[in-house]
Image (spheres, helix red, strand yellow):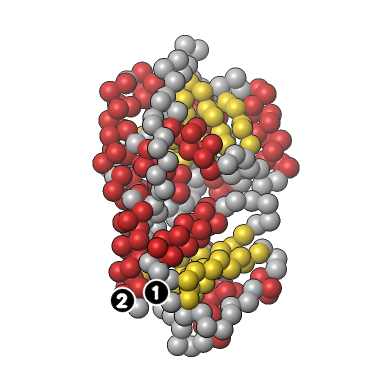
Amino acid sequence: MRIAIAVPTRPGITSGNSVTGERWQRRLTELDHQVEILPVVEGRESDLEIRSGVDLVIALHARRSAYAVECSVAGNTSRPTIVALTGTDLYDDLPDNTNALRSVESATRLVVLQEHGLQQLASISPALAAKASVVHQSVEPTGLVRTPNPEHFTVVVLAHLRAVKDPLLSAKAAQLMADTSQLRVLHAGSAHSQHWRELAETETRDNPRYQWLGGVEQLEARRLLANADVLACTSKLEGGANVVSEAIALGVGVVGTNIGGNRGLLGDDHPTLVKTGDHEALARVFTRLESEPAEREALAQRSRQRKWMTDPSHERSQWQTLLDEL
């Protein structure tokens, strides 16, 4: 088939949606399809063009790609359109946002990134859940080996600086650690505004346990993760964070917020999830993990047990099943 993947983009920012779109392009190409990426540029949605002869449209994010979904459905009523619910659309926009709701209702099929997404859809509309499938996010093998620094307890944050990511929660938790703690927080991610840049720069200057590294290339981000004791994913909302899948693939333990996107990837019984915005509870988790090597190892083991989820062949198989059903 000729497949077009509509990906919402912001100029100058590599988002999770962009990473997912490029990865799905690889997976579907491996299945012998012809696949192109259609950027849906914020503020310039009307520039989007779905060429004739496209057999299937996959649109990432129900609200931000609503124009692409509308064009696909209106341009060819017999062409299937898949809408992938990737984050704020599933856990914030629905069911009240008109554009997001129109996208999911007009889509042929829906995709979510983890099992909890099916539960969330069912709570909104059983009819929507009935046409949804899970496609787990895979991670390309890198050959990296875990080598945490024994002189520190290293927490890595891989998140752009914007409100929904609550990116400075780990820094706030680090401020509460005991004087004897060797915790350090290394944070990689681009600032989405001058305000966020100034916040991160100020935190780096004033908090000796925190360092903002700015935006980094994907391989460098994975090296940081391989050298970490844990990943911290402290978002207020996630559809299923790429960085959590990358931690799972490397066998790195994950701490973070008790949100559907994290529970869906890590399990409802994951022991190191805290209420969103609760930096005091997060500091207690950091303290426990730093002082108990056996607990750190148990957390890493949980990631290793879920590594199957991140295998490219698994993601490819899930796509094949969905396309066969179509």
Say whether residue 73 is visible: yes
To which quarter of the image does residue 319 belong?
bottom left
Q: Nearer the viewer, mark 1 or mark 2?
A: 2
> Which corner quadrant holds the N terminus?
bottom left
Mark yes or no: residue 275 visible. Answer: no
Q: Mark 1 or mark 2: name the one nearer the start of the chain.
A: 1
Residue 147 on image: x %, y %: 40, 25
Report whether 226 appears left or right of 65.
left
Q: Which residue is mark 2?
A: 325
- Residue 133, position as x, y percentages in the image: 34, 66
Give the residue at x 67% y 23%: 205
Residue farthest to the right?
194
Q: Amino acid at mark 1?
A: Arg
Quadrant hosting residue 266: top left
Callout 1 environment at 10 Å: few (<14), some (14 to 19), or many (20+)?
Answer: many
Between 86 and 40, the one nearer to me in the picture: 40
**Quick one: SS at disc 2?**
helix
Q: Which residue, as the protein is rendered here, is positioned at the far bottom?
A: 77
User: Which sits in the foreground, 177 or 222?
Assistant: 222
Q: What's the residue type where badge 2 is placed?
A: Glu
Residue name at image x 33 percent, y 50 percent:
311
- Determine the secondary structure under disc 1: strand
Q: Position of residue 179 (x, y in %)?
A: 50, 12
| Residue that mark 1 sits on | 109
Which quadrant does the C terminus fall into?
bottom left
Residue drawn at x 42%, y 24% is 148
Looking at the picture, how far across and down is residue 58, in whole percent? 48, 70
